[in-house]
Amino acid sequence: MFIRYKKTFEKIAMGLLSFMPTEKDIKKLQQTIKTYETEENHQLFLWKEEDDIIGLIGIVKRSEGLIEIQHISVNPSHRSLGIGKSMVKAIKEMFPDSTFIANEHTDGFFQRCKDETELENGI
Ligand SMILES: CC(C)(COP(=O)(O)OP(=O)(O)OC[C@H]1O[C@@H](n2cnc3c(N)ncnc32)[C@H](O)[C@@H]1OP(=O)(O)O)[C@@H](O)C(=O)NCCC(=O)NCCS
């Protein structure tokens, strides 16, 4: 399940964000986390299973009804178990009236999730 980011999760969130190719530089990482803490249209959700936080999704509300997935990351020890896809599904369910888009850094996986949904729907 998703929990909303708060300051007490800063270290774990930065650790997970650092798996994104764009967040390798510590200064950039600090800037990114600050943006999620301060900008109202930037929101970070952490994926908790049992007592562990093992993934995250960061979104930006671009305009009314349009949400961009900016960051998506899963702890390497928990990859290829369907968590990434579950997170994409859960974030879409959280904002059912919104259209979701990716950016150039999240599009690869986002498209992969989309294809599976389309397949399930027989499209
Ligand atoms: C992308 C990521 C979140 C996927 O998490 P996950 O929990 O392993 O995802 P799932 O188990 O739901 O799906 C795994 C599948 O996605 C594929 N996948 C992983 N990264 C991918 C990418 N960048 N583009 C397309 N497919 C990708 C895997 O090859 C795997 O395929 P398989 O099911 O045939 O084995 C994870 O690999 C990660 O944290 N990567 C580092 C951060 C990153 O680069 N994020 C942006 C990705 S575009």
Image (cartoon, rainbow, N blue to C red):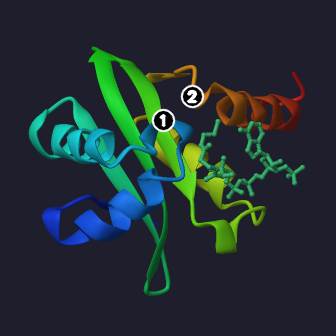
State whether residue 55 is above or below residue 69.
below
Image quarter of residue 108:
top right
Examine the rendered structure and indicate whether residue 4 appears above or below residue 29: below
Of tags 1 and 2, the one toward the viewer is 1
The single residue placed furthest to the bottom in the displayed view is 51
Q: Mark 2 near ligand 1 (CB under 8 Å)?
A: yes
Q: Secondary structure at mark 2?
A: loop
Measured Cα–Cα span from mark 1 to mark 2: 8 Å
Please provide percent x and percent y for residue 58.
39, 42
Looking at the image, which residue is at 46% across and 66% down? 1
Q: Which mark is residue 105?
A: 2
Q: Residue furthest top?
A: 63
The kind of secondary structure element at disc 1 is: helix
In which quadrant is the C terminus drawn? top right
The residue that label 1 is drawn on is 22
Q: Disc 1 or 2, which lies upstream in sequence?
A: 1
Q: Is residue 90 above or below residue 7?
A: above
In this rendering, position of residue 72 left or right of residue 122:
left
Measuring from the top left, give residue 46's x and y in whole percent. Answer: 39, 61
Q: Quadrant of residue 23?
A: top left
Q: Are marks 1 and 2 in contact (CB under 8 Å)?
A: yes
Q: Residues within 10 Å of mark 2 (few under 14, many from 20)?
A: some
Relative placement, left or right, of 53 versus 5 is right
Mark 2: amino acid: His
Drawn side of residue 70 relative to residue 78, left or right: left
**Image location (x, y in percent) of residue 36:** 22, 42
Residue at image position (90%, 28%) is 122
- Residues packed near mark 1 inside 10 Å, few (<14), some (14 to 19) or many (20 plus): few
Q: Is mark 1 within 8 Å of ligand 1?
A: no
- Say what amino acid the circle numbered 1 marks: Thr
Q: Residue 85, how many percent across, how many down? A: 67, 50
- Relative to 64, is 25 on the left or the right? right
